[in-house]
Image (cartoon, rainbow, N blue to C red):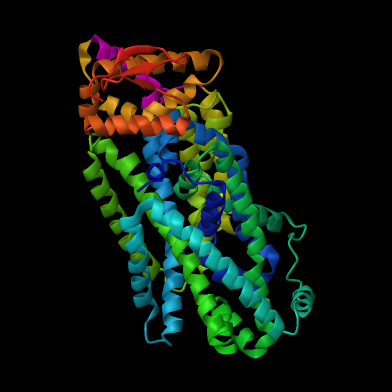
Amino acid sequence: MCSSDLGRHLPLVMIVTTTFATWFGSETVLGIPAKFVAGGLNSVVEDPFGAGTCLILVGLFFAGKLYKMTLLTISDYYRERYGRGIEVVCSLIIILSYLGWVSAQVTALGLVFNLLSGGTISIPVGMVLGTASILAYTLFGGMWSVAVTDFIQMIILVVGLAIIAVFAAGQAGGADKVIALATSKELFKFLPEPDFGQVMFFLAAAITMMFGSIPQQDVFQRVMSAKDVKAATRGPVIGGISYILFAFVPMFLVTSALIIMPEQAETLIKEDPQKVIPTLVMEKMPFVMQVLFFGALLSALKSTASATLLAPSVTFVENIWRQFFPRMGDKRELWTMRVAVLVFSVCVCAYAIALQGTPIYDMVSGAYQVTLVGAFVPLVAGLYWTRATTQGAVFSIVLGILAWLLFLMTSAGATFPAQLAGFLMAIVGMVVGSLGPQALKNRHGSHHHVVGVLAHAERGGGADHHLLRAANQGLLHLCVGAQGSGANGAHFHLATRRFFHLLCKHFGRAAEASFVSQPTLSTQLKKLEDEIGMALVERARAGGAGVGSSGGSADAILAGA
């Protein structure tokens, strides 16, 4: 149900397609054109420009660092950098942000079912049906099904919308006429007027999804699923650029509608601009084009919604539920994950029904404000500022969220954007909290304490639940670190050798503590070797194995592997 299911085998082309397909959702097909036709490019700076730039930034500045850390979830980073308290808080922030995003996809599905049925199926009932259809393959297929369907759905999406755009251009009298109309209406105007208020709100809109979308589990899952660092870093960049460019296709379609059905389009723009393109296709295009469009639309909705149903569920189970039940076995974890997906689906559907009438674009853009003010600054500071502390993270989160809520709930938000105020205060909180006197202890996550745990076990303390995390997740941390250079590399190399020395002497206890069988743990070790491209154990002819050093020598015999 998470990125680890894939074993890091997705090639570059699938990383590109799955990031693109996840980003290309209801807001792109319905929300962006609705905002564009009303206010031009200036009104859609948040999405696609901010959203696409987010993927580019992930590839350039975040993917490489996070990929080498081999974390299971993005929230694992907060635990390892700042401690478990920050992990839980940031996990809740990330999960909360998904409500708006997934609700937007569910709202669009309700609209599609309503239009296709000629009004027979109401929008709320359509939302329920759409949620159930997404839930089906997400619940039982996991991350692999999401990646495969994203690949197929992107092909349908790109081909379908491209054909429809060509057909619409023909109906409008040529693409040049469509572009000329958009130019005459100043729809291509991007930059705001040189006014302080307009500039601030423009900047706030730009960074909301540009930065707020970075600390998201769905993006992280795709980065972690790449087969190598090259795919992890290049995939999001190519996917982001492709997303920005292809987002112009729906904008072209809605502009074409102004020529093909001018009076009807103007009426729909006043009532519900999200219906302009679906109405154009249903009333002015042949059946084949209708199949292509709604097939492409459903592909976009399902690829986005499936990813965004899975991601918060993984975060909840791994980073919140495990705080209370650290010794979950594999079967229980899978069952808990499926229950979490189901519960989150119900919450999303109820939330979407409650917000019926809210524009899809606003639902998506509003979802990322909470991660912008609460989770983004601690992530960046932790990765690029060595002086960032747990106290700094606490100050950043508290001040960022408080400032955001203050501006959001008062008249101050009308003169200065709430999310920008929260973002600036989050930066202030991180700097002041990290550089000031440290009243709060600087904490780190479990994998930083593996060496201490091993020492305890070697003294006779036994293999406790910490060894579970070491055996199942921490191994790769240590192994990647062993390949480093300098003091840190030497430290991790020593930790690696000590861990495997202990593992070899107490393999049965390690498997027992991991709540898996010895063959299962042995298989995990073999997969780990394949992933990092180096031998960790040297398997003897008699069925034993020894821990391999960098020089290929054996330190001990692994009985029962």
In the image, residue 27 lies in the stretch drawn in magenta: no
Give me the residue at 46% from left, 61% from top.
Answer: 303
In the image, residue 448 lies in the stretch drawn in magenta: yes
Left or right placement of residue 69 versus residue 235 in this view:
left
Tell me which segment is drawn in magenta: 437-459
**Rendered location of residue 385, percent (x, y):** 58, 28
Magenta segment main secondary structure? helix
Give me the residue at 47% from left, 16% from top.
Answer: 550
Can the viewer see residue 151 in this picture? Answer: yes
**Rendered location of residue 399, percent (x, y):** 50, 40
Can the viewer see residue 409 in this picture? Answer: no
Residue placed furthest toward the front: 541
Quadrant in the picture for the C terminus: top left
**Rendered location of residue 367, percent (x, y):** 48, 56
- The answer to whether 479 is drawn above or below residue 307 in the figure is above
Give me the residue at 43% from left, 47% from top.
Answer: 94
- The answer to whether 509 is drawn above or below residue 209 in the figure is above
Residue placed furthest toward the top: 459
**Rendered location of residue 489, percent (x, y):** 51, 17
Left or right placement of residue 331 versus residue 71 in this view:
left
Numbered disc total? 0
Left or right placement of residue 265 versus residue 310 in this view:
right
Q: Quadrant of residue 155?
A: bottom right
Give me the residue at 53% from left, 53% from top.
Answer: 19
